[in-house]
Amino acid sequence: MLERLQNIDREVFLFFNNLGVKEWDWFWVLITEKETSIPLYAVLLFLIFKKIKLKGLGITILVVGLMITFTDQLANLTKDAFQRLRPCNEDFIEYGRFLAKRCGKYGYFSGHAISSFAVATLVSNVLKPYYKHVFFWMFFWAIIVTYSRIYVGVHYPGDILTGAAVGIITGYLFYKLHKYLTSRFNSNQ
């Protein structure tokens, strides 16, 4: 059963990875870099500050910092526990495309997916009273970032789906922490 799932994951990886075209490689390589999201984070921090003021911004930065630390450590622990090789470390990558700068050893589950979907969930919930389409845009961003990991050849779709699911759950739990801290320490909400 597990071997069958891994074969399906490999086939789906090769399908999506090979959808890539050389003219767009630069875009997906750029998107997969964590630093590319910094302008988005700056805009989100500004919007949070604008709506829930300085104390709310401070609470948000604290909660997001804790959440990113948690998601990063959880992804690393899971990778070490499962020790599933990344596609870029497998022989079949010769039938796919590897565009990333580096290829870590293990990939289950994706740290990019858990952190992107956790941030999307938390920030969407914080900003939903003020911005009608925030869920759509945040999850669109998370999907693009996580798809880039397949495109550049470093994650299977199963790595992405698991990371996304755990990220959504984590983001919601940290949103509850944010809500509690904001109601306790911020009189603006």
Image (spheres, grey):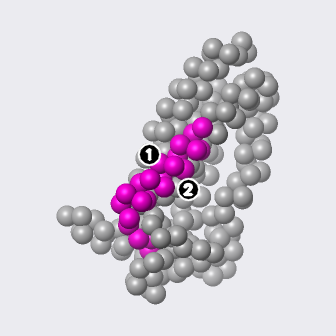
**Quick check: is 69 in the magenta stretch?**
yes
Q: In which quarter of the image is the C terminus?
A: top right
x and y percentages locating residue 39 in the rendered image: 77, 51
**What's the residue at 44%, 53% (across, down)?**
77
- The answer to whether one can see residue 164 in this image is no
x and y percentages locating residue 153 in the rendered image: 51, 73
Q: In this view, does 171 lie to the left or right of 126?
A: left
**Quick check: is 12 in the magenta stretch?**
no
**What's the residue at 75%, 23% (across, down)?**
55
The secondary element bearing badge 2 is classed as helix
Q: Do the residues labelled 2 and 1 touch (CB within 8 Å)?
A: no
Q: How crowded is mark 2: few (under 14 residues within 10 Å), some or many (20 or more)?
A: many
* Kind of residue indicated by mark 1: Val
Principal secondary structure, stretch drawn in magenta = helix
Q: In which quarter of the image is the N terminus?
A: bottom left
**What's the residue at 46%, 87% (across, down)?**
94
| Residue beneath disc 1 | 166
For the view shown, which residue lies furthest in the bottom direction? 94
x and y percentages locating residue 81 in the rendered image: 37, 57
Q: Is residue 37 above or below residue 179?
A: below
x and y percentages locating residue 162 in the rendered image: 41, 53
Q: What stretch is highlighted in magenta?
A: 66-87
For the view shown, which residue lies furthest in the left direction? 1
| Residue beneath disc 2 | 112
Q: In this view, does 105 lie to the left or right of 102?
A: left
